[in-house]
Amino acid sequence: MSAESLKNQNKIAIKPRRMAFDMAAPINPFAFKNNSLISTFFYSLSAMFPDGERFFIHSVRLYRDDIQDPELQAQIRGFIGQEAHHGVSHEQLNDKIETLGFPMHKIVEKLSSRITFLKKLDRNRQLALTVAMEHFTASLAEFLLKNPDILDDVSPTIRQMLIWHAVEEIEHKSVAYDVYQKYVNNHWMRYRVMVIAVTHLFSRIALYQVMMLRAQKHWPSWREWREAFTFFWGKKGVLRDNIRGLRQFFARDFHPSDIDQSHLIEGWEQQHPDIAALQVN
Ligand SMILES: [Fe+2]
Ligand SMILES: [Fe+2]
């Protein structure tokens, strides 16, 4: 980790914020650019967040009795508080999306049986999975904060939730990694688990998208395919950006703080006053 990035990351406080999103505000069925492929991609992520993030908390808690460092303990408390709030907010959003005719609850059920299986793995593997997914979410968060304009024509509640979530993902991106480095420190396991996790993640997203489109009896138009391709794989595409982030993870001396994202969250309240105003604690 470079001295500069370490300095910047250490300056970042991990502050759980409870938010009052307006869940009564109307949401378009295909809230992202009126595009079913882009919308169901984000709905799939939202379906996975509550149980997924509770799993992240669980995997870090398995090391609770080993951790003596008060600074790391405080960071873990911040991480747990943030992920717990994310889970609750995305659950509310998922309920809302369900009312639009998407099988969110069915998807959550499917995922929960997978998570029951994951909890049977040894604790090092569970933590490695959290480390991998935290890197994925931090890369996605970076993308959203770098390109907030892509959320301009998204239903406001979803836009607000994603920006708030992105800010906090960057704040706590190093916590699981620091625990892993201290108590596991197995690079090959970290690489292996990342490859498996990303493969599973994208096959799950695709499966959930099919379930949602089937429930909507909607077959994407040529316009939607074209737009989605640019959105995911174009020059400024979200997945293209994510793959760049993924490559850094495979360096032996990788640390999340090496990727300096502090400028993306500094002053976010001024940049997004409508979102900052939703904070209730
Ligand atoms: Fe989160
Ligand atoms: Fe996270």
Image (cartoon, rainbow, N blue to C red):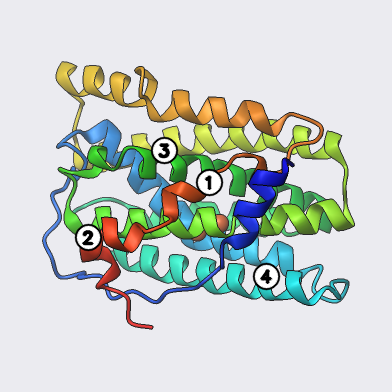
Rounded to the nearest whole Å, what is the CA distance between mark 4 and mark 1? Answer: 16 Å
Specify whether tag 1 is near ligand 2 (CB below 8 Å).
Answer: yes
Say the numbered circle drawn on residue 138.
Answer: 1
Say the numbered circle drawn on residue 157.
Answer: 2
Q: State the residue in front, 128 or 164.
A: 164
Residue 238 place in picture, x, y as percent: 40, 30
Rounded to the nearest whole Å, what is the CA distance between mark 1 and mark 2? Answer: 21 Å
Q: Earlier in the sequence, mark 3 or mark 4?
A: 4
Q: What is the quadrant of residue 281 in the picture? A: bottom left
Rounded to the nearest whole Å, what is the CA distance between mark 1 and mark 3? Answer: 9 Å
Residue 112 place in picture, x, y as percent: 55, 58
* Residue on which disc 3 sits: 143
Rounded to the nearest whole Å, what is the CA distance between mark 3 and mark 4? Answer: 24 Å
Check disc 4 and give the amino acid type: Ile
Quadrant showing the N terminus: top right
Check disc 1 and give the amino acid type: Ala
Q: Is residue 148 above or below residue 23?
A: above
Check disc 3 and give the amino acid type: Phe
